Image: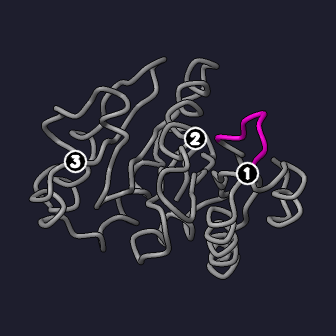
Amino acid sequence: MRDMYNPRVITIASGKGGTGKTTATANLGTSLALLGKKTIILDADIAMANLALILGMEKSKVTLHEVLAGEADIKDSMYKGPGGVIVVPCGVSLSGFQKSNPERLQDVMIELLKGTEFLLIDAPAGLSRDGVIPLAVADEVILVVNPEISSMADALKTKIMTEMVGSRVSGAILNRAYFEKTDLSMREVEKILGVKI
């Protein structure tokens, strides 16, 4: 089903909210686009979307919500973002969330693979059904974690779920790791997750 680009699907995930996952996704997508790679970022956090807010696209008329509700085509929800990255934002309204059908999410992801080199998926935090689909379709998953016990516990659950659905965690981004004392060192985080930071 993938075209001549043989696109890579990279899901950026975390076990809990507030780790900096959406910002990391936006920065990675923008960087790839600036390197000349055809890159699409999909905000798959249907209930608590923030990518549009971070990128100043909160007034987008057509978003993933409308696509999942069957009211719009995926092409109508694609916008040019920083550095030329293509962004499919998810709406920020509760009414948009209520009318969207998450069962259509996997079909949307497959459609986005046509004509791109990288599809970055900003997954919802946690392990809801909506959060597992982005893990299952990924070629690789990158976890965004903070150096604290609660973040690590939830990230480890996300890693286990990723492996259960047949995908793999290729690495982690350790965010909010300051020079002062933190709960866990970088080496401890690598040891717990079994992946490189």
Answer whether labels 2 and 1 touch (C-beta < 8 Å): no
Q: Secondary structure at mark 1?
A: strand
Q: Residue at (65%, 55%) from the top-left corner?
A: 143
Which disc is residue 172 wearing? 1
Q: Amino acid at mark 3?
A: Gly
Q: Residue at (45%, 40%) from the top-left corner?
A: 41
Where residue 39 sits in the image (x, y, percent)? 52, 34
- For the residue pair 19 and 138, the one nearer the viewer reads as 19
What whole-number distance in Å separates the C-alpha atoms at marks 2 and 3? 22 Å
Q: Is residue 106 rendered magenta in the image?
A: no
What whole-number distance in Å separates the C-alpha atoms at marks 3 and 1? 27 Å
Category of crowding for the residue at label 1, using alpha-carbon neighbours closer than 10 angstroms: few (below 14), some (14–19), many (at least 20): many
Vertical comparison of 159 with 13: above or below:
below
Compared across the picture, whether 105 is left or right of 126 comes to left
Q: Quadrant of residue 37?
A: top right
Q: Main secondary structure of the magenta part?
A: loop
- For the residue pair 181 and 13, the one nearer the viewer reads as 181
Residue that carries the numbered disc 2 in the rendered image = 118
Which disc is residue 91 wearing? 3
Vertical comparison of 19 with 163: above or below:
above
Q: Quadrant of residue 32?
A: top right
Where residue 74 sits in the image (x, y, percent)? 27, 47
Give whichever of discs 3 and 1 has the lower sequence position.
3
Q: Amino acid at mark 1?
A: Ala
Q: Secondary structure at mark 2?
A: strand
Where residue 107 sits in the image (x, y, percent)? 36, 64
Q: Secondary structure at mark 3?
A: loop
Question: Which stretch appears magenta?
Answer: 176-182
Compared across the picture, whether 195 is left or right of 134 comes to right
Q: Residue at (83%, 67%) from the top-left corner?
A: 192
